[in-house]
Image: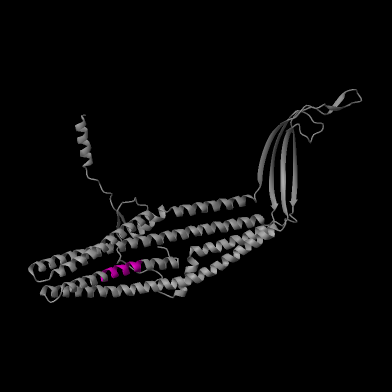
Amino acid sequence: MTRMGLLAVVCLLAAQPVVAQPAVSLTIDEAVARALAHAPRLAEVRARERAAEATRAAYEAAGRPSVSALTGFVRTNHVDEFGLVQPDGTRRIIFPDIPSNYRVRAEIGVPLVTGGRVDALVASAEAERRAVAAESASVEADIEFETVVAYWTLALARARVDVLEQAQRRADAVVSDVAARVETGLLPPNEQLSAEAQRARQRVQLIEAQNAAAVAEAQLARLVGVEPGQPIDLTTPVAGDMTIAGEVGDPSVLAREAARRRAERQALGDRAAAAEAAARAAAAALRPQLTALAAIEPARPNARFVPRVDEWNTSWDLGVTLSWSLFDGGRSRAERAAALARAEAIRAAMDDFDAAVDVDVRARQADVAAARAGLAAAAEAVAAAREARRVVGERFEAGVATTTDVLDADVALLEAELEQTRLAVALRIGQARLMRSAGIRR
């Protein structure tokens, strides 16, 4: 292929249109499901849960029989044999020269009495495992809440862009109308400049809103695992069903139920139980420990057989070992005191958590009620502003209203529409906050 032909092919390929990535359509529930499946934080806490399970299994194994085996070979220097002369004139070797020594030993140890230490350690590890599992549920709730907030934040940003685009189109129409009237001499030139200045201010707001929407989309994409730059289509309407469990009712009852449901409180309770069990384990270190031992030991030569001979002999032993730490410098008592202090601190944190949840639930209920009432008022404000804009437009057409009047009416309608959108999303986010505070999952 000639250089010109190759250049033509390259130019043809470069001229091909770039295929845009298809949009990902997500309902709010689909976004939450994808976020839970994608979240690295959740994978991290689940790995810690598996580690806690392994720790519990290790402590459980400490109370079971253990079997060990060993083998060895030792080469020693040559020694003079020692023996006795028998009455018949023969010499009996008592200590022969055997430089090669072989040994095999297998033993089993059975803990009979541990003073409650193993049981306490297992209980502590199990409580810690439950605490980590509760943390996993708490992380899931956090991810769910963050995804809901990101979803509705993007919805608000896009709604703001839509409202500002509509306002921009109205401003363009007003500028065109005013320019036509200025050309015919019906209006002075300053009216056109005022209209253009208002349109420019709205364009700045539109640019800022578009940037905020792009940032919000990137944040949601990060949470749900969508590739950067891939569009996201939100299919759950902002003005859909806006009723949730816990929105109305006695806040005291809801707060008590929240304290029972919240995974954070469950984790605190489990960690307090783990600390108390650790205190029992530390105290058990001062109690007697009883262990049984059985072993079998083939050896060549076997030192338990006299005289020593260069051949395999098997010996065995059974025994019981009693150990009792009479004094350890106060270490066990200090460890017990530290564990009990940790448990006391966690119990105090639980009381503080209960009080904070009670206040938080009441505040979230009030936020939802205020947002719902504000949304109803905002709908009335939008209707009134839209009607006022229509009347001012007709008066402007009739020549009895100024361009300033039209621009003021446009601004009032724009602000009313933006406020209505903001309150609708604020209600959605407020409901998500209430559900998170009350421990209610989607």
**Residue 312 position by quadrant:** top right
Q: Give the total number of marks visible in the rendering.
A: 0
Residue 176 vs residue 336: left or right? left
Image quadrant of residue 307?
top right
Q: Identify whether 347 is placed above or below 314.
A: below
Residue 420 among magenta residues: yes
Q: Position of residue 296 (x, y in %)?
A: 72, 39
Indicate the quadrant where residue 389 lies.
bottom left
Q: Looking at the picture, tell me which residue is in the foreground, 340 or 320.
A: 340
Q: Which residues are magenta?
A: 416-428
Q: Residue at x 72, y 45 (%)?
A: 293
Quarter of the figure that contains the C terminus = bottom left
Compared to residue 392, the image places residue 91 above or below, namely: above
Q: Describe residue 82's horizontal placement relative to residue 279 as left or right.
A: right
Residue 260 pos. (x, y %): 50, 67
The residue that appears at 56% across and 50% down in the rendered structure is 54
